[in-house]
Image (spheres, grey):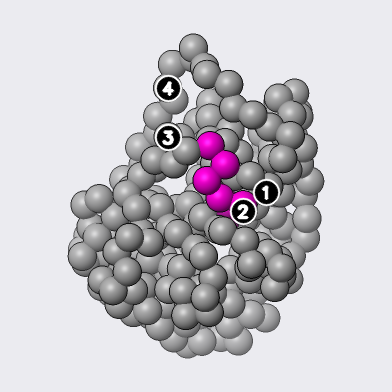
């Protein structure tokens, strides 16, 4: 699993966030080292991030991500033809944006620690309907070939539990194959069966070819029920390639 730092502007594009959306209480799950919450706070937006890395790497996460970004510069240059550059312009533009986001995150988690909570799917440390809107970037379907269907179902139900209105997940393609997650339609049918409507919506952001869609869950009619099913867990450790000195596909 990889951790990166995406900006407020990227979030707006990835999740098609309107000014009205940003008037709501928002959860970023998992937040990683993104600067969304930091920049949201500068704009008076009520946003919170949750991530398991905030429990163990809280103080150094922003610096780790900055170093990771710099480490993969050469690989990014070599693989530039594999990506869509309409958003960043070129690899140098991507590196500037990611490093800038990591630095904003690092400053904000120190200044406003209460906005960054340790926790991970599929069991979040929030009460039902704690947020109006939940956004989830580059985790669930991105790792669709590593995280099992049971984990995906449990994670989506948990995101819907804490969201009063909507959950938005981006992207719906697997990061190392570029293919749409093959269990998506089955998951949508299962969610519909418990009162969670969904749609796949195209957005004005694409970096990985074909990765320009998000899944939107409508949660207003959903009420979580106590479950007798065993808890589904999934652990995919973060790979800090700059520490290992190895290369892996850019995400």
Residue picked out by circle 1: 166
Image quadrant assignment for residue 34: bottom left
Q: Which of the two labelled residues, at mark 4 and mark 2, occupies the earlier sequence position?
A: 2
Residue at position x 75%, y 23% from top?
A: 193
Structural distance between the alpha carbons of marks 1 and 4: 24 Å
Residue picked out by circle 2: 133
Q: Which of the two labelled residues, at mark 3 and mark 2, occupies the earlier sequence position?
A: 3
Structural distance between the alpha carbons of marks 3 and 2: 17 Å
Instruction: Provide residue 213's location: percent of width, then percent of height.
Output: 72, 57
The majority secondary structure of the magenta stretch comes to: strand
- Asked if the residues shown at circle 1 and circle 2 are in contact, with their CB atoms under 8 angstroms apart, the answer is yes
Q: Is residue 179 left or right of residue 26?
A: right
Residue at position x 34%, y 53% from top?
A: 117
> Helix, strand, or loop for circle 3?
loop
Residue picked out by circle 3: 123
Structural distance between the alpha carbons of marks 1 and 2: 5 Å
Instruction: Provide residue 150's location: percent of width, then percent of height.
Output: 53, 26
Residue at position x 63%, y 80% from top?
A: 87
Instruction: Provide residue 51's location: percent of width, then percent of height.
Output: 37, 52
Please state which of residues 65 and 114 is positioned toward the viewer in this rendering.
114
Above or below, 131 relative to 233: below
Residue picked out by circle 4: 231
- Asked if the residues shown at circle 4 and circle 3 are in contact, with their CB atoms under 8 angstroms apart, the answer is yes
Image quadrant assignment for residue 149: top right
> Helix, strand, or loop for circle 4?
loop
Q: Which residues are magenta?
A: 128-135
- Asked if the residues shown at circle 1 and circle 4 are in contact, with their CB atoms under 8 angstroms apart, the answer is no
> Helix, strand, or loop for circle 2?
strand
Closer mark to the observer between disc 4 and disc 3: 3
Structural distance between the alpha carbons of marks 4 and 2: 24 Å
């Amino acid at each position: 699993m990889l951790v990166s730092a995406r900006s407020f502007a990227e979030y707006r594009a990835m999740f098609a966030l309107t000014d009205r959306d940003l008037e709501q209480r928002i959860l970023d799950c998992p937040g990683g080292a993104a600067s969304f919450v930091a920049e949201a706070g500068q704009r008076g937006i009520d946003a919170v991030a949750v991530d398991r890395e905030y429990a163990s790497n809280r103080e150094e996460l922003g610096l780790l991500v900055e170093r990771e970004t710099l480490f993969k510069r050469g690989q990014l240059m070599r693989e530039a033809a594999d990506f869509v550059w309409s958003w960043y312009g070129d690899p140098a533009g991507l590196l500037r944006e990611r490093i800038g986001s990591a630095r904003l995150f690092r400053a904000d988690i120190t200044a406003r620690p209460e906005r960054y909570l340790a926790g991970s799917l599929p069991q979040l440390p929030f009460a039902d309907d704690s947020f109006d809107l939940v956004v989830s970037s580059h985790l669930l379907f991105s790792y669709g070939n590593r995280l099992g269907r049971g984990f995906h179902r449990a994670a989506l139900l948990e995101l819907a539990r804490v969201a009063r209105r909507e959950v938005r997940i981006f992207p719906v393609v697997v990061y190392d194959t570029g293919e749409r997650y093959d269990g998506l339609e089955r998951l949508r049918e299962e969610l519909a069966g418990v009162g969670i409507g969904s749609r796949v919506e195209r957005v004005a952001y694409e970096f990985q070819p074909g990765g320009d869609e998000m899944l939107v869950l409508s949660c207003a009619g959903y009420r979580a029920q106590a479950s007798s099913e065993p808890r589904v867990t999934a652990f995919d450790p973060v790979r800090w390639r700059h520490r290992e000195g190895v290369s892996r596909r850019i995400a």
